[in-house]
Image (tube, rainbow, N blue to C red):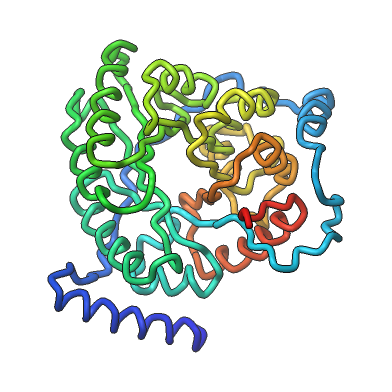
């Protein structure tokens, strides 16, 4: 481990000792096990192809760049949009001190934190303590939580607990819903989401529907209908590249970004084989969540789409099931900076 990381760890430890003396929960490096069940991929993706007409349409929609494709224009004085991973992918096996030190040493601006249960929220509080102490040097950009109706019914108690943990802090709450038994009607879901959004509004928290394969909403074009129907200022949608690909929505990416841009609360990417590996469901999932160094998808095209449609917020990196953050995070940041330069994904002056 580099001297820079050791120094960052030392400073964070000193910080947390001070915070603990003020009544702040100490960092315990608790490990979390991903208990998500397997993902079922829609049949249409199994025969996924990439007709040249689809590629041409997407390139046309993303072609109005302000920068030559080789990235030769100067970026002096410009700062790339914030780039951050989720709190898993090996980061969940590190203490908060160590994970923050690694993220900062590799240039990442913050993190999205799982917040689906009390143990998750305890760790979230630790990330918030660091964020509050460091100001704009480290940010909790989002929290995320799945709701499985089979286990939790239509209660929003768990969502309230996370919203309470976020009140007065930064970040957007990403929510997604799974109904394995098919017993939840659209009306039931709408009523539940309205309650969540209403409660979050009272607490000053923004919420975003998170389309996720094998959930009730697996793509943004479907999800935006619920967002618009509920129509609240603090309720939007997240665009997840890998879930759009898994849902078979490659040919509709340009349409999707155009359709949801007025309610786009977040964008997440990951490396991907292309076409996806359709030899099995598990292979397909794995092929859509890769480090950026292993990416085959036209990421410059996708990022140009969101830029040209006015998105200028942080970009998340889905690192689910990636194993060694000391390996993939440094390479990711180098590639992200290159993409940022080519597409000019810079923060506003």
**Which quadrant: the C terminus?**
bottom right
The image quarter containing residue 259 is top right
The image quarter containing residue 88 is bottom left
Q: How many marks?
A: 0
Residue 105 location in percent, x, y? 51, 75
In the rendered view, would you say 327 is above or below 190?
below
270 sits left or right of 60 in the view: left
Q: Residue furthest front?
A: 349
Q: What residue is at 68 percent from the left and 61 percent from the top?
A: 337
Q: Observer-nearest residue: 73 or 253?
A: 73
In the rendered view, would you say 14 is above or below 29?
below
Residue 141 location in percent, x, y? 42, 52
Q: Is residue 297 visible?
A: no
The image quarter containing residue 294 is bottom right
Q: What residue is at 31 percent from the left and 41 percent from the top?
A: 205
In the rendered view, would you say 208 is above or below 35?
above
Q: What residue is at 36 percent from the left and 60 percent from the top?
A: 92
Q: What residue is at 46 percent from the left and 30 percent from the top?
A: 211
Q: Observer-nearest residue: 142 or 279?
A: 142
Q: Is residue 252 visible?
A: yes
Residue 116 location in percent, x, y? 27, 44
67 sits left or right of 344 in the view: right
């Amino acid at each position: 481990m580099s001297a820079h990381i050791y120094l960052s760890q030392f400073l964070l430890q000193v910080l947390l000792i001070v915070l603990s003396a003020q009544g702040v929960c100490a960092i315990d490096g608790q490990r979390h096990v991903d208990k998500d069940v397997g993902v079922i991929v829609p049949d249409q993706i199994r025969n996924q192809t990439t007709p040249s007409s689809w590629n041409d349409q997407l390139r046309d929609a993303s072609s109005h760049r302000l920068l030559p494709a080789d990235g030769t224009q100067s970026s002096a004085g410009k700062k790339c949009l914030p780039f951050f991973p989720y709190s898993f992918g090996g980061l969940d096996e590190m203490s908060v001190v160590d994970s923050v030190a690694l993220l900062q040493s590799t240039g990442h601006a913050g993190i999205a934190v799982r917040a689906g249960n009390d143990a998750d929220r305890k760790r979230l509080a630790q990330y918030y303590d660091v964020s509050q102490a460091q100001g704009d040097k480290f940010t909790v950009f989002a929290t995320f939580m799945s709701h499985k109706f089979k286990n939790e019914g239509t209660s929003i108690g768990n969502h309230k607990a996370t919203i309470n943990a976020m009140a007065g802090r930064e970040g957007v709450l990403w929510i997604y819903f799974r109904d394995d038994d098919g017993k939840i009607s659209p009306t039931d879901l709408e009523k539940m989401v309205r309650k969540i959004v209403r409660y979050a509004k009272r607490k000053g928290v923004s919420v975003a529907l998170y389309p996720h394969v094998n959930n009730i909403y697996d793509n943004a074009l479907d999800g935006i209908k619920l967002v618009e129907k509920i129509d609240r200022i603090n309720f939007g949608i997240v665009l997840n590249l890998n879930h759009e690909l898994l849902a078979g929505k490659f040919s509709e990416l340009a349409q999707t970004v155009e359709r949801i841009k007025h309610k786009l609360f977040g964008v997440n990417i990951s490396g991907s084989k292309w076409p996806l590996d359709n030899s099995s469901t598990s292979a397909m999932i794995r092929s859509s969540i890769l480090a950026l160094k292993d990416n085959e998808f036209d990421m410059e095209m996708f990022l140009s789409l969101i830029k040209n449609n006015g998105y200028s917020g942080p970009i998340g990196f889905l690192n689910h099931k990636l194993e060694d953050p000391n390996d993939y995070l440094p390479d990711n940041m180098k590639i992200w900076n290159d993409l940022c330069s080519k597409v000019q994904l810079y923060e506003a002056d």
